[in-house]
Amino acid sequence: MTTEEVKKKALVKKKEKVAPKPEELAIDAASQKMIARSRELEVETIFDRAQSMKPCNIGAQGTCCKNCAQGPCRLPLPKGGIEGEDTRKGLCGATPETIAARNFARMVAGGAAAHSDHGRGVAETFLAAARKETEDYRIKDTKKLLEIAPDFGVDITVEGENGEILDRDIDEIAVEVAEKALAQWGQQQGEVCTVKRAPAARYELWKKLGVVPRGIDREIVEIMHRTHIGVDQDYENIVEQCSRAAIADGWGGSMIATDLQDVLFGCPYPLRSSANLGVLREDHVNIVIHGHEPLLSEMIVEAAELPEMLELAKEKGAEGIQLSGICCTANEILMRHGVPLCGNFLQQELAIVTGAVDAMVVDVQCIMENIANVAQCFHTKIITTNPRARIASGDTVHIEFDEHTALEDAKRIVRTAIENFPNREKEVIIPDAKSDLIAGFSYEAINYHLGGTFRGSYVPLNDNIINGRIRGIGGVVG
Amino acid sequence: MIVLTTGCTAIACAKAGLLTPESAKVFCGPGLAEVCETVGIPPVLHMGSCVDNSRILMAATEVVKAGGLGNDISDVPVAGSAPEWMSEKAISIGHYFVTAGVYTIFGGRLPVDGAPVFKNYLFKELEELYGGMWDMVVDPVEHAQKMIAHIDKKRKELGIDKARERVLMDMADRQKLEAA
């Protein structure tokens, strides 16, 4: 074949490639509609990019090592599989096992760091609230505070002058819990205290295996050290460190985040709401809150309900303000305020494509850089709020959020959204799709539901599992 | 099976209409549907954001404490799943589920196929240490079947795998029970 012929053939092949239909890309009708709309407007989204970007085969197998400059070393499985001894090695001699374990460990470190740094932020705000350094956050759920205090080794009673047992001052308890909680991150020795909440047999097993985490940050840092060139080269030993960091996340950083968020904002109980892009309203200022932390979103909920904000919205020609959320910050304000869910991770660009989003306010985690590019095709303002998470693409606004001036910052954000309402240019198309839902099942709420206030208990659940009416429990997440 | 959910999966369940009590009658077997109707809860319980997976750990701990289903989380008929995982956070969550003693299955590809010995360690040998282990199946039906199979294995180990007839007892029956 001549060069010309090859080129011609390649060109024909390229032309033959037809983009899959929206129905082949998403099961959700609202998403399908917005994918079609994005194509009509020639706005590129993840659904288009996924067609041209194929995953790296070596990375997908977990056997690309770029932890030093001798490589990157690539150790994919041989095409015909492994025959006899597996002789694959990186330049330093690292086996595929060592490399895959290192990569796996660094994912655990990344994940645990994300959850736990979120928890740290909550603990810092909690401390500021307990010390009354901020007027915007208060201790809301004292019942939960009293429940969790003993787990942090904080007394909830004091001895009176005559030896009688008295209730301890709630503010004093809050400050001590905050300090003890925050100390779990930097602790160097001992045990992350909330790990003891696990069933006794589990805790004893962890002790026997030597995986009880010492401090939240320490275990994450140690993963980074062990996976550096030439340190831990035994995959079982690497996984052992993964266990310490992951336990420090689930039973530490994440658990403390949940605890303190509940005390600050209230433990969730069941409530009604709705979900999907259809929660956006054409005649309202739409503020979509996206990311993961409730610290900012709680304040935006408060700010958006202020009469002065509603007046400003009306002045700008809107009927009101519609808040909705994407990803976990959405779940946080859904659980406590019933704020509707606009969508999940893969719908963040599609929400903007409706043309109805006046501002998308983001904090941390799972925010696609491309929302900044999609927003440029519409009037939508992307407002970044966290010093950890800024976006260089597109034209974003940064309004930094500080727990000491939280409500003021939230008001600025809401005002920016309202003032953007008259700038809508493109036709607004909101899919007519939303589903009713009930959310807010904290484990305390399940306890209450199963037995009521005075005899709340998990016994009825166990009974129904034992008698076979319920086969078992599935924890489905991600 | 009653499902506890968080994060983006919870939002997907919401869109599919699974977070309403009424959905129990449509999608669930008679046993679970009856429980949902009696208690007034959906068959899929939204427990919050992804840091709120700690609520699932606490719920599992409460189940152990309530008694009758073993001594540890690894005894309870429970299975974990991240059907459409994508973030590093999910890997950390998966590993704290596994170390808590939970069989944990991921949809989507885990980057371990290139290292078969390491994969075997995560998928099989960890069970000997923790009572929980990793697994990965992309096909949603097979994925769910594997969760059910694990739950059935745990039911068998607890000796509660045989369906029991519901017996209505009167006082005389109860006295007989107590005498025995």
Image (cartoon, coloured by chain):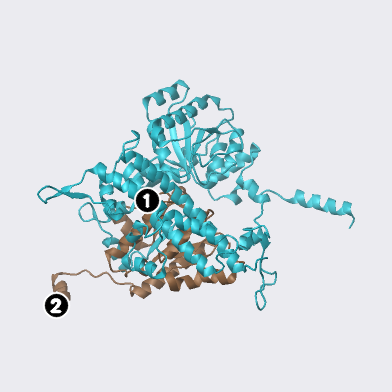
- Assess whether mark 2 and mark 1 are in contact (beta carbons under 8 angstroms): no
Q: Dividing the picture into quarters, in which one does residue A96 lie?
A: bottom right
Residue at the limit of the structure toward the left, as seen here: A162
Would residue B23 be visible to someone looking at this image? Answer: no
Q: Dividing the picture into quarters, in which one does residue B164 lie?
A: bottom left
User: Helix, strand or loop at disc 2?
Assistant: helix
Q: Foreground: A105 or B162? A: A105
Instruction: Determine whether A404 is above or below A220 in the image.
Output: above
User: Helix, strand or loop at disc 1?
Assistant: helix
Circle number at residue A183: 1
Which residue is rendered at x = 47% and y = 22% of the image? A317
Left/right placement of residue A360 relative to residue A189 reads right
Mark 2, Cα crowd under 10 Å, few <14 / some 14-19 / many 20+, is few
Query: Who's brown, chain-wise?
Result: B
**Residue A138 image point, x, y percent:** 31, 38
Name the kind of residue labelled 1 in the image.
Ala
Instruction: Determine whether A180 is above or below A246 in the image.
Output: above
Image quadrant containing the N terminus of chain B: bottom left
Which residue is rendered at x = 39% and y = 38% of the image? A298
Please give the chain letter of the residue carrying mark 2. B
Please give the chain letter of the residue carrying mark 1. A
Which residue is rendered at x = 49% and y = 54% of the image? A111
**Residue B93 image point, x, y percent:** 46, 57
**Residue A177 image point, x, y percent:** 31, 48
Query: Who's cyan, chain-wise?
Result: A
For the residues labelled 1 and 2, the Cα–Cα distance comes to 56 Å
Residue at the limit of the structure toward the top, as seen here: A315
Would residue A365 be visible to someone looking at this image? Answer: yes
Name the kind of residue labelled 2 in the image.
Ala
Circle number at residue B179: 2
Left/right placement of residue A414 relative to residue B69 reads right
Mark 1, Cα crowd under 10 Å, few <14 / some 14-19 / many 20+, is some
